[in-house]
Image (cartoon, helix red, strand yellow):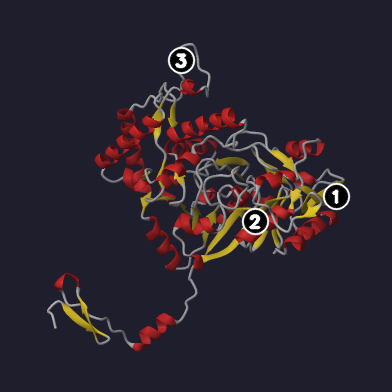
């Protein structure tokens, strides 16, 4: 037998690098124990939006985060907007997990998130000025080294007709120059091009999320691990990337040296927060008992695969995004809570079968104060669409529902709920993928009696008006999913727990 070979099952096999290969022997007891399925020690609890976003996920996360050990963001970027009210102070979050208000918990931004570095630190500073909730936030935040970062560029937005400036043709922001994420610039340019070419746009937040995820998919993006490693190597990659963008957008005014100088400052501030995200989550899942909470951004109908494409975001904001955005094995996903607004809203353009472009819609918009946290845009409003929510349940497998903003319906004498779709008088068996078809659907409604009294001070289910209780039970029966919480106001205390 040759010197660099060995025997395995009677067959001669070559060894690596001329070294003999040895077959590992284990005791039979060890083998048997490995073959017995083991229940994961710690499972993650997930909170996801079940409509088009703005359902009140931040409030539910804040409630569950009170006794959580770890709160995670798994996808999206600063296009998300969550409002949390604590001790009469209203905090707005876009990149930071809402659970950062819990000073006993660690907050984690996973690899599935695209991070706008200026936005991250500006968000923290603004919330610090509002109250004491964010004090010491940097000591309890961790960021995955595999997360992608946005690049900051200097340019004249007047080239693209995106803003108006003063007579000096200079736009001022911070150090007398508009410092903008390049992906955000491209986002705005692409929206303008869609409007000019097709007569409509996607209604994005112009926060650069789509272009950032495009860079990630094109494999030319820059990650956190690149920034906090050898900065010379990072700078070389940055210059190459800048050259690519200048080729695509020749009118850009990119001060590469200045940008690198700013990024070097960010690198030092970011470095203490960065960790190996996969190892970090593995330790949390397999170590001592922990309560781990995952905060979804956006919502099911904005998911890049399962949403109302193309009027969607650029990440997976359904349950599957938890695994890919954090490095969590599917067997470690536990309870999945879907957050459902008691009516339906949508920001921007796209199909909206139950929209009420009338006095009802105006009332819902006014009473619900339906303006986007991130963009300030007026939200379109309509009746609750249970066909849509049932579809979201099919994709996510909700353990239970959090029904929010029930109090907005307090003044209505009757309330309609969408229960089926038809097209050309034919019933649709499922939620359609084709947006042209969704634009054509007619909605069959179930009309339920209103309660015409305030629910804002109610703190237990039994104290709700009978009609409000019936409304909640109707939703449960249709979806075959229990309602666990009911929201009747903005504060933590206004979330009624049913079980």
Return the residue at label 3.
169
For the residues carrying marks 1 and 2, which lies nearer the camera in this image?
Answer: 2
Residue at 49% from the left image edge and 37% from the top image edge: 208
Check residue 392 in the rendering and tell me which mark sits there, or answer none. 2
Q: How far is the residue under mark 3 from the one under mark 1?
A: 57 Å
Q: Which mark is residue 264?
A: none
Determine whether the residue tagged by mark 3 lies in a helix, strand or loop: loop
Instruction: Give yes or no for contact between labels 1 and 2 (Cβ–Cβ under 8 Å).
Output: no
Q: Residue 182 in the image: x percent, y percent?
A: 43, 33
10 Å crowding of disc 3: few (<14), some (14-19), many (20+): few
Q: Which image quarter is the C terminus in?
A: bottom right
Viewed as shown, does residue 347 lie left or right of 262? right
Q: Secondary structure at mark 2?
A: helix
Left or right of residue 453, residue 232 in this image? left
- In this orientation, which residue lies closer to the viewer: 204 or 127? 204
Circle 1 is placed at which residue position? Answer: 451
* Rendered view: 99 above or below 92: below
Q: Label 2 crowding class (10 Å Cα cut-off): few <14, some 14-19, many 20+?
A: many
Query: Residue 442: image x %, image y %?
Result: 78, 47
Determine the residue positioned at 49% across, 45% down. 96
Position of residue 304 measured from the top left corner of the image (x, y, whole percent)? 55, 49
Label 1 secondary element: loop
Do callouts 3 and 2 mark residues in contact (Cβ within 8 Å)? no
């Amino acid at each position: 037998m040759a010197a660099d070979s060995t025997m395995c099952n009677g067959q001669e096999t070559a060894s690596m690098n001329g070294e003999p290969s040895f077959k590992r022997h284990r005791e039979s007891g060890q083998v048997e124990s490995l073959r017995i399925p083991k229940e994961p020690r710690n499972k993650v609890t997930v909170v996801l939006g079940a409509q088009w976003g703005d359902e009140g996920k931040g409030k539910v996360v804040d409630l569950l985060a009170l006794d959580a050990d770890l709160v995670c963001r798994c996808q999206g970027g600063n296009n998300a907007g969550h409002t949390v009210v604590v001790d009469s102070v209203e905090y707005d979050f876009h990149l930071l997990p809402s659970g950062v208000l819990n000073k006993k918990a660690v907050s984690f931004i996973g690899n599935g998130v695209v991070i706008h570095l200026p936005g991250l630190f500006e968000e923290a500073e603004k919330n610090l000025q509002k109250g004491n909730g964010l004090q010491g936030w940097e000591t309890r935040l961790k960021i995955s080294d595999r997360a992608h970062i946005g690049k900051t560029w200097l340019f004249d937005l007047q080239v693209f007709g995106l803003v108006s400036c003063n007579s000096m043709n200079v736009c001022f922001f911070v150090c007398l120059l508009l410092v903008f994420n390049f992906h955000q610039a491209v986002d705005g340019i692409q929206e303008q091009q869609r409007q000019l070419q097709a007569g409509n746009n996607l209604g994005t937040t112009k926060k650069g999320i789509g272009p950032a995820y495009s860079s990630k998919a094109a494999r030319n993006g820059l990650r956190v691990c690149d920034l906090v490693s050898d900065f010379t190597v990072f700078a070389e990659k940055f210059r190459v990337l800048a050259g690519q963008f200048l080729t695509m957008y020749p009118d850009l005014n990119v001060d590469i040296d200045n940008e690198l100088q700013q990024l070097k400052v960010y690198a030092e501030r970011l470095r203490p927060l960065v960790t190996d995200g996969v190892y970090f989550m593995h330790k949390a899942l397999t170590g001592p008992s922990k309560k781990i909470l995952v905060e979804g951004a956006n919502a099911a109908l904005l998911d890049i695969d399962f949403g109302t494409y193309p009027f969607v975001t650029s990440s997976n904001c359904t349950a599957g995004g938890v695994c890919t955005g954090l490095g969590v094995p599917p067997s470690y996903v536990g309870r999945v809570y879907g957050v459902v607004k008691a009516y339906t809203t949508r920001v921007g353009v796209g199909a909206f079968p139950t929209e009420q472009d009338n006095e009802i819609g105006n009332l819902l918009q006014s009473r619900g104060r339906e303006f986007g946290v991130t963009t300030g845009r007026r939200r379109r409003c309509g009746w609750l669409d249970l066909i849509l929510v049932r579809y979201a349940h099919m994709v996510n497998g909700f353990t239970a529902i959090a029904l929010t903003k029930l109090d907005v319906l307090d003044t209505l004498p009757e309330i309609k709920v969408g229960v089926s779709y038809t097209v050309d008088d034919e019933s649709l068996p499922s939620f359609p993928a084709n947006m042209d078809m969704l634009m054509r659907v007619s909605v069959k409604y179930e009309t339920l009696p209103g309660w015409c009294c305030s629910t804002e001070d109610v703190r237990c289910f039994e104290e709700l008006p009978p009609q409000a209780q019936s409304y909640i039970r109707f939703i449960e029966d249709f979806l075959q999913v229990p309602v666990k919480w009911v929201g009747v106001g903005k504060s933590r205390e206004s979330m009624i727990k049913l079980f």
